[in-house]
Amino acid sequence: MSYQEFYDKSMSSPEEFWKEQAEAIPWFEKPKTILSKDEEGLYRWYEGGKLNTAYLALDYHVENGRGQQVALYYDSPVTGAKQAFTYQQLLEEVSLFAGALRARGVEKGDRVIIYMPMIPQTVIAMLACARLGAIHSVVFGGFAPHELAIRIDDAQPKYLLAASCGIEITKVIDYMTIVDAALEEAEHKPEGCIVYQRPQLEAALKEGRDYDWQDLVSRAEPAGYVPVEATDPLYILYTSGTTGRPKGVMRDNGGHAVAMKFSMEYVYGVKPGDVYWAASDVGWVVGHSYIVYAPLIHGCSTILYEGKPVKTPDAGAFWRVIEDYKVKVFFTAPTAFRAIKKEDSKGELKKKYDTSSLDYLFLAGERCDVATLEWCGQLLGVPVIDHWWQTESGWPMLANMVGVELLPIKPGSAAKPVCGYNLQVVSPDGESLPAKQEGAVVIRLPLPPGCLPNLWNDTPRFLSSYMSSYPGFYFTGDGGYIDDDGYVFITGRIDDIINVAGHRLSTAKMEEVVAAHPAVAECAVIGIEDQMKGQIPVGFVVLKGGVEKTEEELEGELIQMVRAKVGPVASFKKVAIVQRLPKTRSGKILRRIMRHIADGKPFSPPSTIEDMTVLPELEGLMKEKHIGHGAD
Ligand code: COA
Ligand code: AMP
């Protein structure tokens, strides 16, 4: 079947289409309905179906002859460790840890926060929660204590799982100091913390609060899987929104399992038994979907890589992993390749390795510039597939569905809508726009299975963030256009979210922190283009009268504050002191115009601008401070 036929089928009879796809999943009880609405009027897939996601990812494969196949390769250049877990071994580890959690009273529906690095225990913890029907929420290690505290208060976990440390190239990050500060700040107090001790830095456990992971496991009985409803939550993953408060994206069990399996087969073109590698972090959605759940549900071997594209030990690290494990499909963010290109522009290190096992390279997480796409293609000699999605969707919304048909690649475009996504580009008043006209990218409801059915405990925010701007549609937050051949070009976020080295961050959050400095009268944080990280945040600050500190002192303090409140991952490293900010007469800061000035893009100031002379003033200051396109 061609892509077009397959896609059209998903559009003309979605229920029939997704009923058929659901047949690929071993349900304990088949769904009673395929698509329905819940008591809040929100769409739900597969109501009445019963399953267990850990069963699908592990037990099912062991029962069906995959017990001796490697499920998970752990490769850690930062510690020198390498380990392989067969499906049988991973099942045993997960069952035991689930038993340990159960012995501590964790049950179906309880929340468990996982603040852990890229080690096998993190995957084991996620699957152990899924086995019990408990809802995990993994928090990325690069976030500061305050961000962890916000998530603890929102998810109200029964337990927090942590490792004693993470390793960033050569830096050892003391996780328990971060956990201590977060628990101090959070109002909700979990019943306890279960801590996995790593030899690189052992934590001093707090009596009465902390439990030693290995000790609990040594005394645990293996736990069986708990059947859950298709509509029961599997996990909550917090992501940056347009305010300082992150959004708890909720994922259910049934729709997620179907979407994961479907995407492996038809988007990525892999078969059970193949080696699939997503070089991301389990703290992001890419890690949830394509390091853990999708490859395991599909019976593949997945790779957990605790390293970077460069410096662990060099820019040949990715090629080494591809050769070592005979990776068939590889997925990462364009920024990783920009980092490699910077260190090894001619790809000399690639010559040392045999990457002939590779069929495709997939890129996502941020806009993929054409130069990077072409460089990757020439270096690896395989099709490079730019595909577009987000935490909320949980799986690709735009892609070249290579498992169905490899369409011609148009650099700069993430190709065409994936089955189930009725994607349109609309004007501010919701009118569908003709080809090549840029507008807001929206998806006609219902969203396909696997996408967020709601936010955790916050239906009003779910509706206001995604559903109310364009009634009948889900608003993705991205802008873009469709060309005459139906290829979609994503041009970037049209809200205050930025993507720094593939990490999604909120500038509003950073503004909140900067504005709290006693010397700051007002400020704007904008994301500007960066050759390596795609985008980086820059703060523009107007000072209160009578401030006696030097510009360098203030800049240092503000950078430190963002690092301490948001986390190092924000990469907030530049601040400019300005006399005033461009505003409308009603006082709205013109951040978009500031961004365009920094990126050297044409813009037309709105007629409502307060004072036009601020614009050349700002442009001059950016040049002087080496901010933006004129920097070098
Ligand atoms: N725990 C603790 N700190 C972390 C962290 C983690 N899990 N991840 C990142 N950080 C810290 C880094 O150590 C760094 O701290 P520093 O300011 O003290 O140096 C800071 O956060 C910024 O990290 P990062 O954005 O990763 O930048 P970098 O300059 O260290 O590395 C790349 C740049 C391109 C090599 C790196 O971003 C990368 O490998 N990107 C791959 C893309 C990716 O995985 N995207 C995920 C979505 S697909
Ligand atoms: P996250 O939720 O962290 O996965 O970030 C999602 C956002 O990253 C999207 O809304 C886009 O703005 C951006 N993004 C992801 N993939 C792409 C892509 N292939 N092209 C352009 N932008 C992308």
Image (cartoon, rainbow, N blue to C red):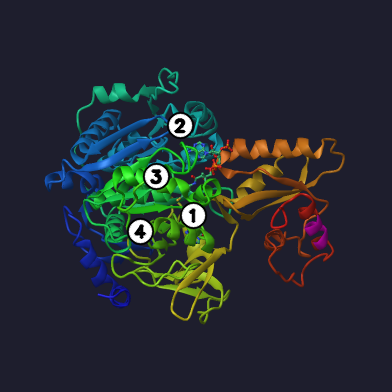
Residue neighbourhood size for the residue with mark 3, other residues' Cα within 10 Å, grouped as few (<14), some (14–19), many (≥20): few
Identify the amino acid type marked 2. Answer: Gly
Q: Which residue is mark 4?
A: 360
Identify the amino acid type marked 1. Answer: Pro
Closer to us: 309 or 379: 379
Instruction: Say which label, 2 or 3, has the lower sequence index.
Output: 2
Highlighted range, magenta: 616-620
Closer to us: 630 or 442: 630
Answer yes or no: disc 3 within 8 Å of ligand 1.
no
Query: Helix, strand, or loop for circle 3?
Result: helix
Q: CA distance from mark 1 to mark 4?
A: 14 Å
Q: Which quarter of the image is occupied by the N terminus? A: bottom left
Answer yes or no: disc 2 within 8 Å of ligand 1.
yes
Of badges 2 and 4, the one in the foreground is 4
Q: Which residue is mark 1?
A: 334
Query: Helix, strand, or loop for circle 2?
Result: strand
Q: Which residue is mark 3?
A: 352
Of badges 2 and 3, the one in the foreground is 3
The relative height of residue 40 versus residue 566 in the rendered view (above or below) is below
Please indicate, yes or no, whether residue 519 appears anywhere in the rendered image.
Answer: yes
Q: Which mark, by number, is residue 166?
A: 2
Percent x, y for residue 291? 35, 47
Closer to us: 230 or 187: 230
Residue neighbourhood size for the residue with mark 1, other residues' Cα within 10 Å, grouped as few (<14), some (14–19), many (≥20): many
Query: Helix, strand, or loop for circle 1?
Result: helix
Identify the amino acid type marked 3. Answer: Lys
